[in-house]
Amino acid sequence: MRSHTSPLLTGFAMTTLAVMTMLATPAAATDDPRIQDKLGWHTVQPGETFQAITQRYLGTPHLWRENWKLNPQIKDPGLLRAGQRLRVIVERQLPARRAVIEEVSNVVDKRLQRGAWQAAASGDPLAPRDGVRTAEQASTRLGFDEGSELTVSELSQIYLKGLDSTVRGVKRGSIEIEKGQADLLLAPAQPRKVNIEIVVGDAVTRPRPGPNGRAETRSRRPEAGGAQLMVYGGSSQIEAGGSTVEVPRGMGTSVPEGGAPLPPEKLLPAPVVTSPTGNPSFGYSNPRFAWRPVAGAASYTFEVCLDPGCAQLVRRVTGLTSTQWQPEQLPAAPLHWRVTAVSASGLDGYASRGQAFAIESELRDLEPPIVVAILLGEGASTAPDTFVVGAGSRLRLAARDDASGTAEIRYRWLDESTADAAWQRWAGQDLAPPPRDAKFEFEATDHLGQTSQRWRVNVMLDSTAPAAPTVSRQDL
């Protein structure tokens, strides 16, 4: 794994400051063995004091006496000469910060200090060198103390390579994705004081918050190797193969295994969802979901979650080429769903906003509706498929679907001169038979699009119909 180190002196001209950095933990610098100081050499400039030098490196002048202790040859700290070389603390590492597992959905494990894997739970802390992994249809969300979040999707494994703070107030972190993907939300109160690196294979990503103080990225380790980066908020820099590429908001890039980042490409927009919307409740567990196609999409990723942001995953389906999806069964619970278009290069576009819905029963709707025709008025059923109707008789349609419910009942009249006819939607009104013998066809469809058997009844006119009950019912 390649090691990447940020410059120690960002923003200072090297012509006025000569620094050679070394790692040390001098006993004189601190009594806290958990603190590690990076020491270097500083060439005094005209007019500089220990206080000013300490302020420059550590962001506070109050630790100047510790720098004085590192230079026993200086008897009077107020008498520095230009050109003197001083040994100074250029960076102080405070005790490591910790992340906390905030959400756990389905099977999630943690690994402490590269030990054995064990079940993870909400509230578990994570320190540097700790890891988490998710099983199929599982996810977890990690929270950091400055307000950032990392959502780890299914079949993923990540490690916290480092979490530290400095006296200058900069909080740094390094996260390695060994497989799968993770979404980073960088939203600190002071964006310039948080630096997080995402390491995926040989690629290193450094997200930066935008004007709103937030950065949102998705980093993925594809099964074929390499890396993928998608930037939904702020911007990011990705380094691999000796090249560094800037990726602005709304763009993404891929890194071939062992290669350099490809030129950024525009991410696809969020699909427009069509159903269900408006927070409906379903009395069955396999509703159908639909959305409009996105130009340029090679496939879609569909997610059902317990929360709008999908930190608590319930179902995830990738590689969909249709613009609709129907599960075999979802749990009875308040849920949310969203869909993402995926480009031909494999980069995820923007996800649709999470749509709320609820499953009230684990009953599955696997059967189409049952539909019947009812004869009202004078007439009789002389055979299973024949009505003999008198003057003034009417036909009524009825359908029943115990799960999703009946969406539509359709009918049409056929006779010897009409081999085919347009279907009409039954609006609930009783139908008068035509003034001649005809065939009456009808069917029904439920809200899942399941259509009943199509029925055909011979309707024969008889002005002298025999006495019969006023209502004949044909149960088909």
Image: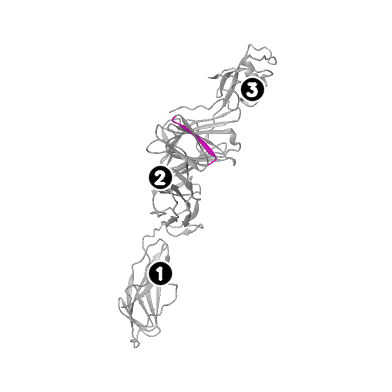
Q: Which one is earlier in the sequence, the residue at label 3 or at label 2?
A: 3
Labelled pair 1, 3 in contact (Cβ < 8 Å): no
- Number of labels in the image equals 3
- Whether 389 is drawn above or below 27: the answer is below
Task: Kindly indicate the quadrant of the structure image that contains residue 220.
Answer: top left
Does the segment drawn in magenta span residue 237?
yes
The residue that mark 1 highlights is 409
Residue furthest bottom as drawn: 464
> In the drawing, what numbered circle is on residue 189?
none
Mark 1 residue type: Ile
From the image, state whether disc 2 or disc 1 is nearer to you.
Answer: 2
Disc 3 residue crowd, few under 14, some 14–19, many 20+, Cα 10 Å: many
Report the magenta residues as a range.
Answer: 233-241
Q: Which one is earlier in the sequence, the residue at label 1 or at label 3?
A: 3
Mark 2 residue type: Ala
Label 1: element kind: strand
The quadrant of the picture occupied by the N terminus is top left
Disc 2 residue crowd, few under 14, some 14–19, many 20+, Cα 10 Å: few
From the image, state whether disc 3 or disc 2 is nearer to you.
Answer: 2
The residue that mark 3 highlights is 54
Disc 1 residue crowd, few under 14, some 14–19, many 20+, Cα 10 Å: many
- Render colour scheme: one colour
- Whether 332 is drawn above or below 29: the answer is below
